Amino acid sequence: YIADYQKVRILAQKFPPSELPALTGLAPSVVQQYLDLLRVYEPGVALCQPPPAELDTLEEPPSSTCG
């Protein structure tokens, strides 16, 4: 349990949430539970947030907060 949490904790700082199940080998629901725990109990951990989709513009999309 702790090792899987640590995997998610480390990878969530560098990769968007959608990639975490494949990277960790965990079910998406388990990854989501770990992310929820991180947000509640470790709010200082900077989680990767992909930029919002910019479908209707030719401007360069904003950069993500991923490592």
Image (tube, rainbow, N blue to C red):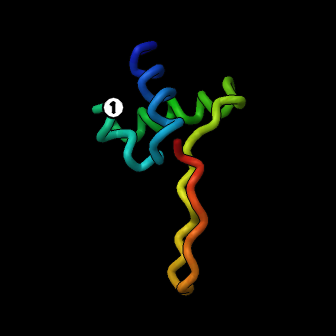
Badge 1 marks a residue whose secondary structure is helix
Identify the residue at horizontal 51%, vertical 33% (top origin): 33
Q: Quadrant of the N terminus?
A: top left
Position in image of residue 22 (x %, y %): 29, 41
Identify the residue at horizontal 45%, vertical 33% (top origin): 11
**Residue furthest toward the right?**
44
Position in image of residue 49 (x %, y %): 57, 50
The reply, left or right, for residue 24 in relation to residue 32 is left
Identify the residue at horizontal 56%, vertical 55% (top origin): 64
Identify the residue at horizontal 28%, vertical 32% (top origin): 25
Q: Quadrant of residue 47?
A: top right
Position in image of residue 13 (x %, y %): 53, 36
Position in image of residue 58 (x %, y %): 53, 85
Q: Which residue is mark 1?
A: 24
The reply, left or right, for residue 41 in relation to residue 57 is right
Q: Amino acid at mark 1?
A: Thr
